[in-house]
Image (cartoon, grey):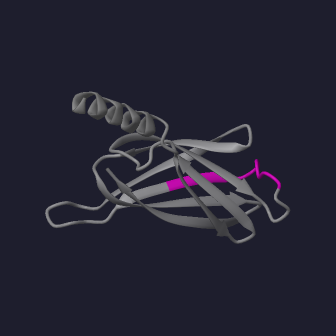
Amino acid sequence: MKRVALIVCALFLMAGLAYAKNYEMTKKAGEYTVRVAIDKNPPVTGKNNMVVGIKDGASKDVTDAKVAIDYGMPAMPGMPAMNYKTNGMLHGTMYHAVVDFSMSGPWAITVKITRAGKAQTVKLNVDVK
């Protein structure tokens, strides 16, 4: 009986992990509301899909911006700083990018939005597993 209960608990745990929500964060950047989502929660070492949604002050989707994503990890003893860049590509109303975290630990992500010659940034930190 204990074995059956243990198997049932394990199945529920695995089902919960399979349907875990994305890592999501919403922040303000000047007049914009920026929603950043990563397809894994928590983000993992290796490739992670990132989606950036931008709304203006009137809550309309912004589709005419350039989105650049800088991500990195500060230097640690015996290891130099790591800095990477990628661009968000517009698909529909969202900007898509792949971020490739080379190791686990704390990473800083900066999303730079350039529109009509003006730039705004959103900064967030993630703990990569």
Residue 105 at x, y = what percent? 29, 57
Q: Main secondary structure of the magenta part?
A: loop
Residue 88 at x, y = what percent? 59, 45
Quadrant where the image shows the N terminus: top left
As for residue 61 lying within the magenta part, the answer is yes
Above or below residue 30? Residue 117 is above
Residue, x 70% and y 55% (percent of image)? Answer: 54
- Nearer to us in this view, 31 or 3: 3
Residue, x 67% and y 51% (percent of image)? Answer: 53
Residue 115 at x, y = what percent? 73, 59
Residue 34 at x, y = what percent? 66, 59
Which residue is farthest right? 58
As for residue 21 lying within the magenta part, the answer is no
Give the residues in magenta: 60-69
Q: Residue 119 vs residue 59: left or right? A: left
- Nearer to us in this view, 29 or 5: 5
Which residue is farthest front? 1
Residue, x 44% and y 41% (percent of image)? Answer: 48
Above or below residue 17? Residue 75 is below
Q: Residue 46 vs residue 16: left or right? A: left
User: How many labels sit on residues?
Assistant: 0
Residue, x 63% and y 56% (percent of image)? Answer: 35
